[in-house]
Amino acid sequence: FFYEPASGLVQSPRDFVLGVGKGSSSLVKNSVVGIFGTASKITGTLGKGVAHLTFDRDYVRERERHGREKPKHFGEGMVWGAKELTTGFKKGITGIITSPLDGAKKEGVGGFVKGMGKGVIGVAVKPGVGLFDMATRTTQ
């Protein structure tokens, strides 16, 4: 912001004006990039923390695997964000049935009870994680 105008001032008044334009453009662009980068990191961290509240290791691992990929542009981020939101709702709702069944297969009656707990918690938490993931993807 300061370098371009100062450099132009040494050259000529016209270069000074062009320098002010370039510097201002750079300031705005870098500020927007910084704000979105910070927002992405904050929502990503919140989503990661809340995902651990599901007590579902497979769900957490799957999220981490998907989170390693970064969208190439804003439009792709919007599409990925919508998919993450949909996945959060889908996993939350279907987890009411699948978590107890998976628990019963692994640990019998005790696993079924644990699965019921995971399913109930998941139906409340996973859609919220999907919202955080959507916010993260759209601001990456």
Image (spheres, rainbow, N blue to C red):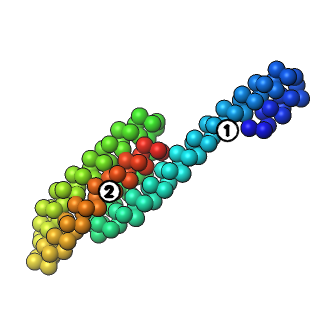
Where residue 127 sits, quadrant-wise, is: bottom left
Q: Amino acid at mark 2?
A: Gly
> Which residue type carries mark 1?
Leu
On the image, the x and y values in percent for residue 32 come to 57, 41
Q: Which mark is residue 129?
A: none
| Nearer to me, 111 or 74 | 74
* Outermost residue toward the top in this view: 14
| Helix, strand or loop at mark 1 | helix
Whether residue 69 is visible: no
* Residue 27: x %, y % from top left: 67, 38
Q: Residue at x 14, y 68 (%)?
A: 100
The residue that appears at 44% across and 55% down in the rendered structure is 44
Q: Quarter of the image for the N terminus: give it.
A: top right
What kind of element bears circle 2? helix
Q: Residue 113: where, in percent of width, then height? A: 14, 75
- Residue to which mark 1 is pinned: 27
Q: Which of the marked residues, 1 or 2, is nearer the chain's N terminus?
A: 1
Cα–Cα span, label 1 and label 2: 34 Å
Q: Are marks 1 and 2 in contact (CB under 8 Å)?
A: no
- Residue at 30% x, 44% y: name it: 83
The part of the image, by quadrant, that contains residue 25 is top right
**Image height check: is 109 above or below 61?**
below
The residue that label 2 is drawn on is 128
